[in-house]
Amino acid sequence: GAVVSQHPSWVICKSGTSVKIECRSLDFQATTMFWYRQFPKQSLMLMATSNEGSKATYEQGVEKDKFLINHASLTLSTLTVTSAHPEDSSFYICSARLGAGDSNQPQHFGDGTRLSIL
Amino acid sequence: KQEVTQIPAALSVPEGENLVLNCSFTDSAIYNLQWFRQDPGKGLTSLLLIQSSQREQTSGRLNASLDKSSGRSTLYIAASQPGDSATYLCAPCYNFNKFYFGSGTKLNVKP
């Protein structure tokens, strides 16, 4: 149980393209989803937290107009990297959790999306 | 600012050894702490979750301990196997479910 699916797993595109990444909870309803970014040989950094039906909360230093997050249903959140540039190349991972706010439920992670911008 | 340090950064051992991976965090006001495994180019697999009120958790050959007041957690791996080779990440969780990840310990278990 508690499977999180991320799509696509790998995407390569030209600079200036907008890229959408999907995160789905397959067998549970995810009230809260999280988006992380991992640069090579670095640890994961939280980008934003999204609760179903409300606006995402972005971490300091993350541009909300650059990284658009939509969490319109309890099983799907999307991250759109707008006008992507080479410096946006990274490994993006989502996680999903049952329960909102200060819940103590574990987070379940997707397999990640490797984004390469040429 | 929460900082998470994992020691050692890398570890290479022969198969069968018992291992100790260390994690320390600067802010002890955690809600829980999770240990994850990450295979190259892959996402995360949750190994163990310890609530802030607990001292340890066990799953198979894995045992994680937590000393919240001193900001430390340890992951013990018994009888290591080549399939255990991966990067192990420690992540204390704070209010509103914010995880702060360490840089990980890259483990290589040689057959």
Image (spheres, rainbow, N blue to C red):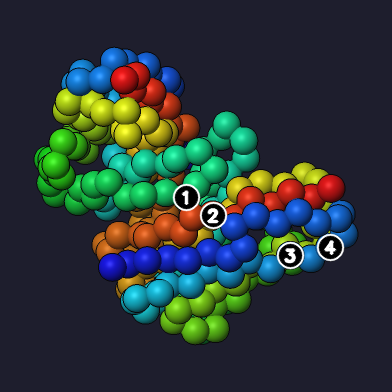
Tag 2, which chain? A
In this view, the residue in front, A103 or A77, is: A77
Extreme residue in the front direction: B111
Amino acid at circle 3: Val
Q: In x, y percent, where is residue B104?
A: 43, 32
The residue where tag 1 is placed is B43
Query: Which comes before the other along the chain, label 4 or label 2?
Result: 4
Q: Residue at x 63, y 51 (%)?
A: A114
Residue B24 - label = none
Dot 3: few (<14), some (14–19), or many (≥20) neighbours within 10 Å?
A: some
Amino acid at circle 2: Gly
Report if the CB atoms under discs 2 and 1 are less than 8 Å apart: yes
Tag 1, which chain? B
- CA separation, marks 3 and 2? 14 Å
The residue where tag 4 is placed is A17
- CA separation, marks 3 and 1? 19 Å
Q: Are marks 3 and 1 on the same chain?
A: no
Dot 1: few (<14), some (14–19), or many (≥20) neighbours within 10 Å?
A: many
Q: In x, y percent, where is residue B68?
A: 21, 38
Q: Is residue B6 above or below residue A2?
A: above
